[in-house]
Amino acid sequence: MSEPVTVTVPHKLGLTEAKSRIGSGVHTLSDIIPGASLTGHRWEDDHLHFTLEAVGQRIISDMHVREDEVYVVLDLPPMLAMFANKIKAKLMKEAPKMLE
């Protein structure tokens, strides 16, 4: 059973600028989980779908970019679910940096 980790990041950039900054910083997504690598990403309208891999586990994730917030969902596999609280704390710290 997977463990979804969600974070909402408020911003005042507007939709277009937020998407632009996230697109420029997409390579930093692997910093959320130590030892992870970004193995794929694609935009679908205002949603960034991305995949991270860490310790042989695949993390399917999404960012829903809105006019005044970004809603992030990381779907952790069971092996990483025990670290959900630590990953959420790191995500809350790192995600806003993508919008700077």
Image (spheres, rainbow, N blue to C red):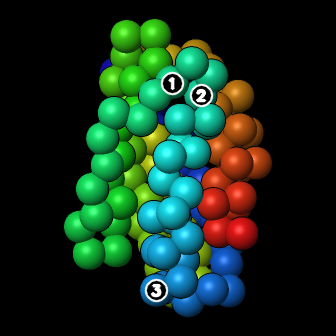
Real-space CA distance between mark 2 and mark 3, rounded to the nearest whole angstrom: 27 Å
Q: Which quadrant is the C terminus positioned in? A: bottom right
Crowding near the residue tagged with mark 1, few <14, some 14–19, many ≥20 C-alpha atoms within 10 Å: some
Tell me: residue 6, above or below residue 81: below
From the image, tell me which residue sits under label 2. Answer: 33
Left or right: residue 62 compared with residue 86: left
Placement of the N terminus among the 4 image quadrants: top left
Disc 3: CA contacts within 10 A as few (<14), some (14-19) or many (>=20): few
Residue 44 tag number = none
Provide the secondary structure element on which disc 3 rests.
helix
Determine crowd level at label 2: few under 14, some 14-19, many 20+ residues with C-alpha closer than 10 A. Answer: some
Q: Which numbered disc covers residue 16? A: 3
Label pair 1/2, CB-CB below 8 angstroms: yes
Looking at the image, which residue is at 30% across and 41% down? 40
The reply to whether the C-beta atoms of the residues labelled 1 and 3 are less than 8 Å apart is no
Q: Decide: is 43 above or below 76.
A: below
Q: Badge 1 is on which residue?
A: 36
Q: Are marks 2 and 3 in contact (CB under 8 Å)?
A: no
What is the x, y in percent for residue 28? 57, 45
75 left or right of 92 in image: left
As measured in the structure, the alpha-carbon distance from the residue carrying label 1 to the one carrying label 2 is 5 Å
Residue 71 screen position, x and y as percent: 51, 63
